[in-house]
Amino acid sequence: MFFNFRTVESLPPTLEANAEQPPLFDGTTRLYTSYACPFAQRVWITRNYKGLQDEIKLVPLNLQNRPAWYKEKVYPVNKVPSLEHNGKIIGESLDLIKYVDSNFEGPSLVPNDPDKKRTLEELLSYADKFMEMLFASFKGDPEKEAGAAFNYLEDALKKYDDGPFLLGRDFSLADIAYIPFVERFQIFLSEVFKYDTIAGRPKLAAWIEELNKIDAYKQTKTVDPKQLVEYYKQRFMVPKLSTPLRL
């Protein structure tokens, strides 16, 4: 089950190094983000799905030219996403999607079923390993290493037969945790290695198709495929380059 909100948001412009800092702790809830960052996209999807466009304001930053005030006055870790809420700043994307789901109104992204709750925690715990396998595949054997990661998702999607999502009928935080990375890896692996991530994986193909019907996710798909491919080539396939924008 999922709710599809069709509110089309006018996105605020990205803030550069010379941008003025928004007021801090003035009662406004702000999501500091980057339109290109998959970690931040997780929280953005969660916000959208719960219909919180008016309650949580986006503050997009240019990570290659980010304002000094972000590190100095907002979030010393100097990464996105971070959330300004109730007089504090919270970070880490997997923690944030849980926080937004439990502290704001809107449809729940955590199932009531105890077995599905356990599966949700297992999937969230594996998300970092999934990303590590895929990034490693860029310098190794994509078919073997990326294949193992996508096989994990294919198998996970077989666990429940009551719907197309990772928890069956319930669109959840599990889907949100994985889709920003699947979106990017699918583009890159196809373009650079001619590797088809959904070949022989019908559940994965159906999952991606269903997610692309959800407006809360579609509205966050702002990455340019060509820029993504060039960035990943430089970042992960060419040694000794400085670290630019995380896509």
Image (cartoon, grey):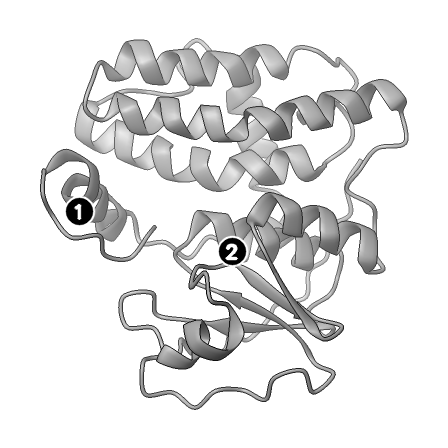
Check residue 230 in the rendering and tell me which mark sits there, or answer none: 1
Check residue 220 in the rendering and tell me which mark sits there, or answer none: 2
* Residue 223, image x, y percentages: 36, 54
Q: Quadrant of residue 185?
A: top left
Q: Residue at x 42, y 53 (%)?
A: 37
Relative depth, front residue between 221 and 23 = 23
Judge whether 140 appears above or below 26 on screen.
Answer: above
* Residue 171, image x, y percentages: 72, 36
* Residue 123, image x, y percentages: 63, 25
Left or right side of 76 for 157: right
- Dot 1 or dot 2: first in sequence order is 2
Q: Quadrant of residue 121?
A: top right
Left or right side of 237 for 76: right
Relative depth, front residue between 170 and 73 = 73
Q: Quadrant of residue 134?
A: top left
Q: How many marks?
A: 2
**Residue flagged by tag 2: what amino acid is it?**
Thr
As helix, strand or loop, the secondary structure at mark 2 comes to loop
Q: Residue at x 22, y 32 (%)?
A: 191
As helix, strand or loop, the secondary structure at mark 1 comes to helix
In whole angstroms, how far apart are the C-alphas of marks 1 and 2?
20 Å
* Residue 110, image x, y percentages: 80, 37
Q: Residue at x 43, y 77 (%)?
A: 72
Relative depth, front residue between 108 and 128 = 128
**Residue flagged by tag 1: what amino acid is it?**
Glu
Dot 2: few (<14), some (14–19), or many (≥20) neighbours within 10 Å? Answer: some
